[in-house]
């Protein structure tokens, strides 16, 4: 195993964990702000509204993260394909250039004789 890859994977997992926990905490704060705007709710109703609001917001965030992840995967595939085509073009241009220079050198050598 490559320690650098393991470290990068571990850091990515930690970043994802922290990002998700921040999103859940923001959903809870949003639920608190929402229920604070409804002062007529009883304590039980307030807790129910907080729970439902938080669950709805977490579900929406989860769906958003999945869409972003899917799009990132699509973009990675598109960019990889573009990179392969560009690399092939550069190699072909290099081969043509080397061939042209070699042919020009041969032609000059033959003309000078």
Image (spheres, rainbow, N blue to C red):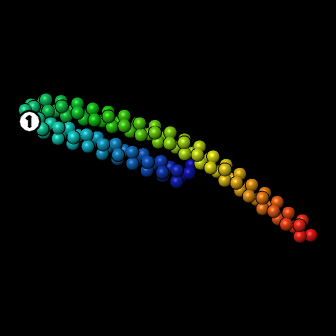
Whole-percent x, y for residue 24 in the image: 29, 40
Which of the pair 2/74 is nearer the observer?
74
- Total labels: the figure holds 1
Asked which quadrant contains residue 112, the reply is bottom right
Horizontally, residue 1 falls left or right of residue 62, namely right
How crowded pointer 1 is (Cα within 10 Å; few <14, some 14-19, many 20+) is rated as few
Tell me what residue is drawn at x 74 percent, y 58 percent: 97
Tell me what residue is drawn at x 18 percent, y 30 percent: 48
Asked which quadrant contains residue 30, the reply is top left
Q: Quadrant of the C terminus?
A: bottom right
Residue occupied by mark 1: 39
Q: Secondary structure at mark 1?
A: loop
Tell me what residue is drawn at x 71 percent, y 56 percent: 94
Q: Is residue 105 above or below residue 75?
A: below
In this view, the residue farthest toward the bottom is 112
In this view, the residue farthest toward the right is 113
Horizontally, residue 111 falls left or right of residue 90, namely right
Horizontally, residue 90 falls left or right of residue 44, namely right
Whole-percent x, y for residue 75 in the image: 50, 42
Tell me what residue is drawn at x 9 percent, y 31 percent: 42
Whole-percent x, y for residue 107 in the image: 85, 63
Q: Is residue 48 above or below residue 107?
A: above
Which of the pair 82/104 is nearer the observer?
104
Horizontally, residue 16 falls left or right of residue 7, namely left
Whole-percent x, y for residue 7 in the image: 48, 52
In this view, the residue farthest toward the front is 111
């Amino acid at each position: 195993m490559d320690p650098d890859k393991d470290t990068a994977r571990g850091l990515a997992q930690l970043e994802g964990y922290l990002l998700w926990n921040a999103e859940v905490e923001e959903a809870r704060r949003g639920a608190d702000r929402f229920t604070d705007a409804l002062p007529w709710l009883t304590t039980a109703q307030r807790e129910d509204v907080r729970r439902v609001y938080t669950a709805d917001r977490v579900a929406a965030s989860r769906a958003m993260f999945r869409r972003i992840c899917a799009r990132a995967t699509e973009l990675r595939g598109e960019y990889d394909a573009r990179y392969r085509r560009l690399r092939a073009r550069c190699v072909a241009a290099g081969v043509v250039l080397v061939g042209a220079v070699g042919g020009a050198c041969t032609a000059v050598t033959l003309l000078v004789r």
